[in-house]
Amino acid sequence: MSTEKEKMLSGRPYKAFDPQLFEERQHAKDVNYQINTLHPFKVDERNALLRKLLGSTGAHFHIEPPFYCDYGYNISVGENFYTNYNCIILDCAPVSIGDNVFLAPNVSVFTAGHPLHYEPRNEAFEYAFPVSIGNNVWIGGSTVINPGITIGDNTVIGSGSVVTKNIPSNVVAVGNPCKVIRAITDEDKLYYFKDLKF
């Protein structure tokens, strides 16, 4: 018979207030509390706590507190990951973030959801679907990424977006719901540096 944790990690309906899952979330809250209350100059100590909390990290990353997550061990971040203040990742399913990803303030990544029909929802069932963010992605402030989403490489998500469907590589996408508005081209490389050559 499967445990609630096994159901959660396999995308099946599960009960989040199972004692094991509750205890694991309490542990993550404890570590988040330590991270979020450290003196700002204690970057090495904060990063050591983050390495213990998260599933995997690159050698170089920077997470501005406050930071919040459900479990931590389901989050993997690549090289040169940066998130600004108040990032929330509900990692009931795996959250995979590539290299050189920047998150602006107040970005929320949700793998967890609840049934639409009130009867199973009132019985405390939940579900969780993985989220994948590719390499070289920039996500604007106050963006919400919903369960089961994949965002491709080199993409920019505009501020205030609600991402409800997969977003391909090499595009700018924005809105609620988030939609592709155009491709990113080599001309974009020169926009802020018109007098420089790359």
Image (cartoon, grey):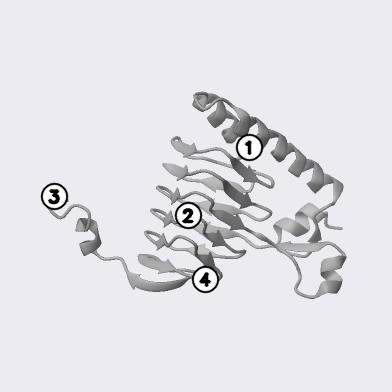
Residue position for label 4? 176
Number of residues whose C-alpha sits closer than 10 Å to that of mark 2, classed few (under 14), some (14–19) or many (20 or more): many
Quadrant of the image occupied by residue 117: bottom right
Mark before the other along the chain sequence, 4 or 2? 2
**At label 4, which amino acid type do we have?**
Asn
Mark before the other along the chain sequence, 3 or 4? 4
Q: Nearer the viewer, residue 100 or 2?
A: 100
Q: Label 4 vs label 2: CA separation? A: 13 Å
Q: Position of residue 110 (x, y in %)?
A: 62, 58
Q: Label 1 vs label 4: CA separation? A: 32 Å
Q: Nearer the viewer, residue 96 or 49?
A: 49
Q: Label 1 vs label 3: CA separation? A: 42 Å
Say whether residue 1 is left or right of residue 65.
right
Label for residue 53?
A: 1
Residue most extreme to the bottom: 117
Q: Label 3 vs label 4: CA separation? A: 35 Å
Q: Position of residue 103 (x, y in %)?
A: 47, 50
Q: Position of residue 161 (x, y in %)?
A: 50, 65
Residue at 62% over, 30% down: 37
Say whether residue 123 is left or right of residue 74.
right
Number of residues whose C-alpha sits closer than 10 Å to that of mark 4, classed few (under 14), some (14–19) or many (20 or more): few
**At label 1, which amino acid type do we have?**
Leu
Residue 79 visible, this orientation = no
Mark before the other along the chain sequence, 2 or 1? 1
Residue position for label 3? 196
